[in-house]
Amino acid sequence: MCGIAGIVGDANPSELAEATDRLLRSLAHRGPDSQGTWSASRAQDRLRLVHTRLAIIDLSPAAAQPMADPATGNVIVFNGEIYNFRELRRDIEAARPARPAGPAERGAAFFSKSDTEVLLRGYALWGESLFSRLDGMFALLLYDHGGRKLIVARDHVGIKPLYYARTASGGLLFASEVRAIKNSGLWSGSVRAESLGDYLVSGAVREPYTILTGVYAFPPAHYAVVDLAVPGPELGQAVCYWDVAAACRGELPAGSSRSLETDHAGLLAATVEDQLVADVPVGIFLSAGIDSTALAEAAPLSVRPRLHAFTVSRRSAGVSEARLAALTAANLGIRHTVCDLSEEDVLAWTREGLAAMDQPSHDGVNVFLVSKASKQTGIIVALCGAGADELHGGYGHFATLAGLAAAARVPGLLPLMRAVVPAMANLRAGRAMADRAGLLLSAAPDIAAMVAEKRRFFTPGQIAALWPDHGRFRDRAEAEQTSQTGRAGALPLLSQISLAEISGYLKNTLLRDADWAAMANHQELRVPYLGKAYMELVLSVPWRLKARQGKINKPLLAGVISGQNRHVINRPKTGFELDYGLMLTGPLRGEFVQAAATLNSGYGFTLKPETMLRGLGDPGADKLARRVFALYALGSYLSRHGL
């Protein structure tokens, strides 16, 4: 797990050296173990690569980056982990000539035990078809010396980030974080006004855009080529190497549902085993829910004694998962630690988490707290259950949206449904609930648009009141129109919801926040449920087998859990949550007022802090408090970064 950057194009030597130093400083928190830079030996290739390393596999200097292939002259900087690297290494070794015949073959033998070198050797053997063979999380820049080109690639679902921008001199700049591009001295721009609107709609800025003008996210499941032989560097057309929608159309292994349960359990166990490989201490974020419990159950018996489970709770919280999580760990023979945070700890670490954000987000601070607490016990690699809800239909709105979309397809019914919405404004729920229902029905029967509306933060009316200059963006929560989601129309409704969540909330909020939150603590966070082979199997399973209504929640995952840990099944979600209302009306009140002033004076917002804070501590105000916290996160981010 690391930080990477690349500079392509013309720049004078002093400017390039200064930019390189800035990039190293900006990415230092992602790679505290070592730093390295590399420049193309051919001046006309105009390429410099930058790397900061968090050593996970092969801790020796042999695995340091930028890494060069002595046989080809190719060079790579890579962020992430390739979980099937040992299998790929065997394939590469099997393809290598038994008796090297010439000088070019002398570098063919592996010189490290790292997955990074497997990428270099694999590219030399398979070219761009390498990416479809990978199962892991990654973002990489690979210099093809012979082809005079730079290969840019990102993992299949967007676990690892990669951003790019034009430099002021017309070159290209790549980096693991938006902040690194901003701080490089090579980019000039400002806040993207449309992204402020997007943030108010979604609580995050949705890819491919970022909070900054001219800075974009490279798409997941794609690679692209920069031709270094031409005068003006251009990022070529991105090529898709894996299609999540196509995975939903895959065929199940032949056999009964019982064999499916066996196949699923076996694949989950193999996935977890691969993701436990590390040369540093490994742990798991353990709650009292199905997702993390299934991961712990899938850990091999031989590994459990050295696996460290970790649960965070708040001392003042009324409900804690710690007792049940401890019982689960004890039943499995896994060492377990509970970090019981005081409100003082929570407050201080919340401020740290806000300062660590790469882009503003309504979420992610809770991940930062869990990561920070577990890192203090020595855990450098941690497994978590992200992605399980998207694949297994764990969110409650899977069923409600599917039912609503099905009803909307009945001839004549949708107009009747829309007609009753105005009457809702007179009910106890009030105007805001009527507005949200109207937006949801206006999106029907388009599933992707309905999911986007379900995830909406502020309604158009609320946005107009908060930011009168909202006309600079489209105030409808538009679904991301990608080639993957665009081909989902023929799939079952629940599969369409799953795809919309994977390409929306999961990618734009959960995974992005997990990356910066863990890296700020010098920790690598792994997500076994998003292993490519595992996703391909689960996405192809009929919904009647993985989302049985009225029975066991997430039956495929529940089937992995042993009898002694059945206490986690069918429990309501009680994950680690922050009391945003308590913090905002208490110790963070002054900081929220300052954040609101930043938005008001710098961006034309019309926030009234004291009015907004009124009632946040009341029962049932959790959603409102989260929305106000989102405004606090946005204003404090813009102020902190001088935007």
Image (cartoon, grey):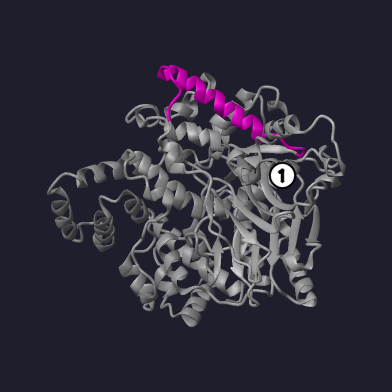
Foreground of the two, 233 or 564? 233
Camera sees residue 571: no
Residue visible at 70% across and 31% down in the picture: 91
Q: Is residue 257 above or below residue 329?
A: above
* Residue 628 at x, y percent in the picture: 44, 64
Asked if residue 534 is among those painted magenta in the image, a careful observer would answer no
Our reading of the magenta stretch's main secondary structure is helix
Foreground of the two, 478 or 628? 478
Residue visible at 71% across and 65% down in the picture: 26
* Residue 170 at x, y percent in the picture: 63, 75
* Residues in magenta, as a range: 251-280
How crowded pointer 1 is (Cα within 10 Å; few <14, some 14-19, many 20+) is rated as some
Q: Is residue 462 above or below residue 284?
A: below
- Decide if residue 66 is on the left or right side of residue 553: right
Asked if residue 266 is among those painted magenta in the image, a careful observer would answer yes
In this figure, which residue is indicated by the disc labeled 1?
124
Q: Which amino acid, mark 1?
A: Ala
Location of the C terminus by quadrant is bottom right
Q: Is residue 246 above or below residue 620?
A: above
What secondary structure is marked by label 1? helix
Foreground of the two, 44 or 594? 44
The picture quadrant where one finds residue 438 is bottom left
The picture quadrant where one finds residue 136 is top right
Foreground of the two, 178 or 309? 178
User: Which residue occupies the extreme front position in the image?
Assistant: 101
